Image (cartoon, rainbow, N blue to C red):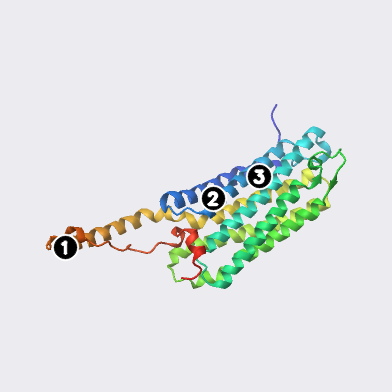
Amino acid sequence: MAIVLNHRQIVVIVTSAVLAPLAITAVTLRLIARFRVTRAGSVDDCILFVGLLSVLTCIASVCSQVLFGLGQHLETISPEDLERFFISFWISIISYAISVAATKTSIIFQYFRFLTKPGPRIACWVILFVVNTYGLFAVFATIFMCNPVQGFWRPAIAKSCLTKDAVWITNSSVSIATDLVILCIPVSTIFGLNIPLCRKIPIFCMFGVGIVACMITILRMSSLLMVARDHDITYINAITATWSIAEITAAIICASVPGIKPIFQRRPRQSSASYIRTTQGSTELSAVEHKGHCSRIRQLPEAMPRPLEEVPLGNCIARPHD
């Protein structure tokens, strides 16, 4: 029997189908650039991969909610499907919280590569603590929202639960606040960086996508307020689910953009460097050969400095000042 979807369900499915491949592509390119091209992969790349897995888990659980009644009115859903809906809903909230914390953590770690002044670095450590502390709270508050845990998806059993709307709105408010702080921390430093404009462009792109992600978070907040005022959660929550998918995919693309550039410029740089080394090496070899001491050829320094995205994160954290 064919499944007939209404317009809200179609929006959720189409949003998922479009944004999930974009997130996968962005993170894959970032990991290839960091681990294969520059060979400077670090902890922030691994954290970003965890964020991608959480994003995909959230998207998969939201799509499964469509099968069990997301986008339909509550009174039209059978008790069996309603229980399955709330199980998927529970999983999606947990994976959403993990993806948000992991993505923001990865972005903050990237900041350490170019923030050298003590003030911005201290601000990064503070916001890193806030993001992860509140991320853990959001995850555990969702897991243990009800006592017993299965009370979240079984309305008939005896249980005691936290006020869901208050928890969700608080989480969203903290997320918006941390988004704004993360966007503001490096602004003055970026404009003052003494690097070519072409190397600032990926950072500006990251900020552009980050602003979009922040705006989506605010729009998602408005849909959460609608959910709080309406008991028809399966119908109203389709809007929130759509904004949630858009938010976490935009955020993870934002975190991936700065690390992708080496894929497109590595070969030309290597060719130039090889040419410089070959030319200079030939000159030195000629100078040494007439003395008959080939073993005394000195090593040449690197032809050009390593870009910020190729510097291992450990070096950036260990040495706060250049």
The label shown at residue 46 is 2
The local secondary structure at tag 3 comes to: helix
Q: Cα distance, mark 1 to mark 2? A: 47 Å
Q: In the rendered view, does 73 fall on the left or right side of 112?
A: right
| Residue placed under numbered mark 1 in the picture | 288
Which residue sits at x=12%, y=60%?
A: 292
Question: Looking at the rendering, which quadrant does residue 275 occupy?
Answer: bottom left
Image coordinates for residue 229, horizontal then vertical, percent: 83, 53
CB under 8 Å between callouts 1 and 2?
no
Q: Kindly identify the amino acid type of the residue bearing the numbered disc 1.
A: Val
Quadrant location of the N terminus in the rendered image: top right
First in sequence: mark 2 or mark 3? 2
Q: Cα distance, mark 2 to mark 3? A: 19 Å
Judge whether 69 appears above or below 322 on screen. above
| Residue placed under numbered mark 3 in the picture | 58
The local secondary structure at tag 2 comes to: helix
CB under 8 Å between callouts 2 and 3?
no
Asked if residue 69 can be seen in this view, the reply is: no
Q: Kindly identify the amino acid type of the residue bearing the numbered disc 2.
A: Cys
The local secondary structure at tag 1 comes to: helix
Judge whether 99 appears above or below 218 on screen. above
Q: Kindly identify the amino acid type of the residue bearing the numbered disc 3.
A: Cys
Image coordinates for residue 152, horizontal then vertical, percent: 79, 43
Asked if residue 175 can be seen in this view, the reply is: yes
Image coordinates for residue 177, horizontal then vertical, percent: 68, 63
Which residue sits at x=70%, y=57%?
A: 134
Q: Residues within 10 Å of mark 1 (few under 14, many from 20)?
A: some
Which residue sits at x=77%, y=47%?
A: 144
Image coordinates for residue 7, horizontal then vertical, percent: 71, 42
